[in-house]
Amino acid sequence: MEGLAGLLVVAVPIVIVLIVLARSVRIIPQARAAVVERLGRYSRTLTPGLTVVMPFVDKVRPLIDLREQVVSFPPQPVITEDNLVVGIDTVIYFQVTDPRAATYEIANFIQAIEQLTVTTLRNVIGGLNLEQTLTSRDEINSKLRLVLDEATGKWGIRVNRVELKAIDPPQSIQASMEKQMRAERDRRAAILTAEGVKQSQILTAEGEKQAAILRAEGSRTSRMLEAEGQAKAIETVFGAIHAGNPDQKLLSYQYLQMLPQIAQGSANKLWIVPAELGKALEGIGNMLGGTPKPNGDAPNGDAPHPAVPVAATPAPPTPAVQPAVAPAVQRDAGE
């Protein structure tokens, strides 16, 4: 018994010392802060690290997170200027800058920020119609941040950003917007199709124009080359004829060879023999030696040669011949 009593006498002071040390030593993590109250009044703010407080006199309140925090609020019904109810989700990015103010100036700063966001959002959206609400997110975010930052400054809180996560108009309005968007896309598609057809037709016309120009230039060049070739051929033939010095007999023979070609053609019913045909025949006869000279004497004193019989060759069928003294051949097209 005496040993147990002595053990208790030694153990009790040790336990009391341990309790006092536990209540006296505080370790504050990084990016945290704690408010110390001495006898119920604010004493000081504990910073990260090891800190010693007076046990049973100082009271350490719960730690306050100094990092930037994100709070997402549920959708809130908001009425626009054109009397449409839309649901808007908001996200708030804030940071505690003064632990003392956040502890004593507001009871629950999270709830206070939520309610302030809802009321401010209704005031801002109430001055905009639906189309402006859907297209003015940056403007709404800026207005919300300014109002919230000004109101929460005295609470020791800084609002860094405010974002509209979603804007949900009524289902009927969504269906109408989808139809409008579909019609707009169809209109743009029709315009683009028409522009494509227009450009295609323009390019096709330009191509046909260039092709016609190239064909005309090619035809002109071809005719020019052909005319130059014919001119050179005529010049060559003309030079050859003059170089050969043809007589009347050769020309008469060539003239007679052209007569069947003149008579050819199914539309030729009437053609006129020129007056020069007799001279041509006379020249051919003299060439063949069948016609003596008027004085009956052969040249150089020789006896006249008898006419050489010419084998009859079948002549091509020709239309009826009507002699006349016209200077050229007249063709009747059978009108």
Image (tube, grey):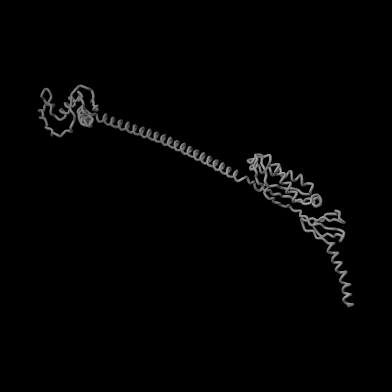
Residue at figure coordinates x 80%, y 60% from the top left? 27
262 relative to 5, above or below: above
What x and y, as percent, mark residue 333? Answer: 24, 28
Left or right of 216 in this view: 335: left
Q: Position of residue 253 (x, y in %)?
A: 20, 30
In front of the other: 219 or 45: 45
In the image, 235 versus 146, the foreground residue is 146
Quarter of the image for the N terminus: give it: bottom right
Rendering quarter of residue 293: top left
Query: Would you place residue 9 above or below residue 212 in this image?
Result: below
Q: Which residue shows up at 35% across the image and 33% down it?
A: 223
Left or right: 301 in relation to 85: left
Decide which of 226, 53 is in the foreground and name it.
53
Residue 139 % position (x, y) = 68, 42
Q: Quadrant of the C terminus?
A: top left
- In the image, 142: left or right of 292? right
Badge count: 0
Q: Quadrant of residue 221?
A: top left
Residue visible at 85% across and 68% down in the picture: 15
Q: Residue 206 lies in what quarter of the image?
A: top left
Q: Position of residue 288 (x, y in %)?
A: 15, 30
Figure check: 325 above or below 62 = above
